[in-house]
Image (cartoon, rainbow, N blue to C red):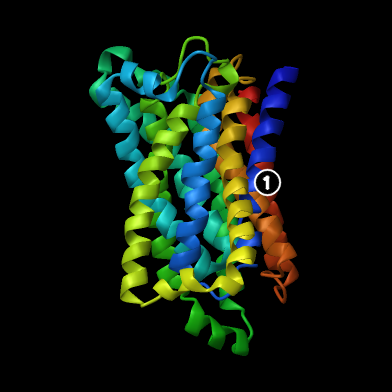
Amino acid sequence: MDINIIIGLFIIAIGSFCQSSCYVPINKIKEWSWESYWLVQGFFAWLVFPFLGTIAAIPEGNSISELLLQTDTFHLLMTILFGVLWGVGGLTFGLSMRYLGVALGQSISLGTCAALGTIMGPVILNTFYPELNPMKQLTGAVMIGVLVTLIGIAIIGIAGAMRAATLAPETSKANKKGNSFYKGIIIALLCGFMSGCFNVGLTFGQNIHFTATPALFHTLPATFLVTLGGFFTNAVYCLYQNNKNHTWGDYAKGNTWGNNLVFCILAGGLWYSQFFGLSLGKNFLLSSPALLTLSFCILMAQNVVFSNIWGIILQEWKGCSKKVIAILILGVIILMISPFIPQLI
């Protein structure tokens, strides 16, 4: 296999590991309601760090405003619009973690996102620009790669369902108070569908960059526009929840601001690392059109792998039978080899 492909997949995996780790610092946040910490960490994850990434993609002598002014208005608005739609997925993503835990919540959400995100981009783009024939990207190798990814995620989902069914009575009782398995499943599926809009936004914004911008950074301006739209969706909902739940006082708790701000910044930086890594990694996959199309799917699959590793570390699978653990490991192995399937076809 081409060494560049190995390097590209490795870079994407590093970004994926960082993203899957972003919920660890969130657990260190104190005395803030969900809507308060979600908004603050989102400010860094979806505005600050993507903006800094965009700055890195602007050649010397140019500016972000210049880039936006020279961009086709339709592509600009569609990139932001699908960011707004992705924001619904980002919002429910946090809720899916709340109801299902890190491992199962990310598995179902990201699995749906991986498949639909890969397929929806070319399909929707074909609706507007059939003469470009973007559907040609969805080759047999790409579809098989998506299918293998879904099989791996489905197996992990089965392990998660078995885990939920065999919880100890006291754990089940607590689960009914803070978690709801079936409610979490519905939220996770909705999250996956809407989260797939992220890749659609990237597809519409794929040419939003200067010709002098290094290829490594080509997708960073589009990433910022997508997350900008997503931040709007999340901010509206979180501020609504602050008002509804009378949690405005969270922001006035001076004794927790230092701790919470540090962990929100860390969580935001870790989350953004996945798309910074995706932008860098894709540049090494140019020799394989199938892997280039599957790059978003590969990122989501690796997110599932690392999220389940974190699930094990956080003891979310503690008390499960060897059979459940074996099924979980099988799913993880399938996801780990799924990026290499298209190269063998």
Quadrant containing the N terminus is: top right
Label 1 crowd (10 A; few <14 / some 14-19 / many >=20): many
* Tag count: 1
x%, y% of residue 32? 52, 72
Q: Residue sitting at 60 percent across and 71 percent down?
A: 256
x%, y% of residue 322? 75, 68
- Answer whether residue 53 is visible to the viewer in this image: yes
Residue farthest toward the top in the current orientation of the protein: 211
Q: In this rendered view, identify the residue nearer to me: 222 or 110.
A: 222
x%, y% of residue 261? 59, 60
Q: In this rendered view, identify the residue nearer to me: 59 or 23.
A: 59
- Answer above or below: position of 133 versus 303: above
x%, y% of residue 172? 56, 84
Q: In this rendered view, identify the residue nearer to me: 270 or 59.
A: 59
Image check: 111 left or right of 132?
Answer: right
- Answer whether residue 327 is visible to the viewer in this image: no
- Answer above or below: position of 72 versus 123: above
Q: Indicate the amino acid at tag 1.
A: Phe
Image check: 14 left or right of 141?
Answer: right
- Answer above or below: position of 143 versus 2: below
Q: Residue sitting at 33 percent across and 61 percent down?
A: 237
Q: In this rendered view, identify the residue nearer to me: 172 or 89.
A: 89
- Answer above or below: position of 127 versus 163: above
Q: Residue sitting at 71 percent across and 19 percent down?
A: 4
Image check: 138 left or right of 16?
Answer: left
Q: Residue sitting at 46 percent across and 28 percent down?
A: 221
The image quadrant that residue 170 belongs to is bottom right
Per the image, the residue denoted by label 1 is: 17
Quadrant containing the C terminus is: top right
The image quadrant that residue 101 belongs to is bottom right
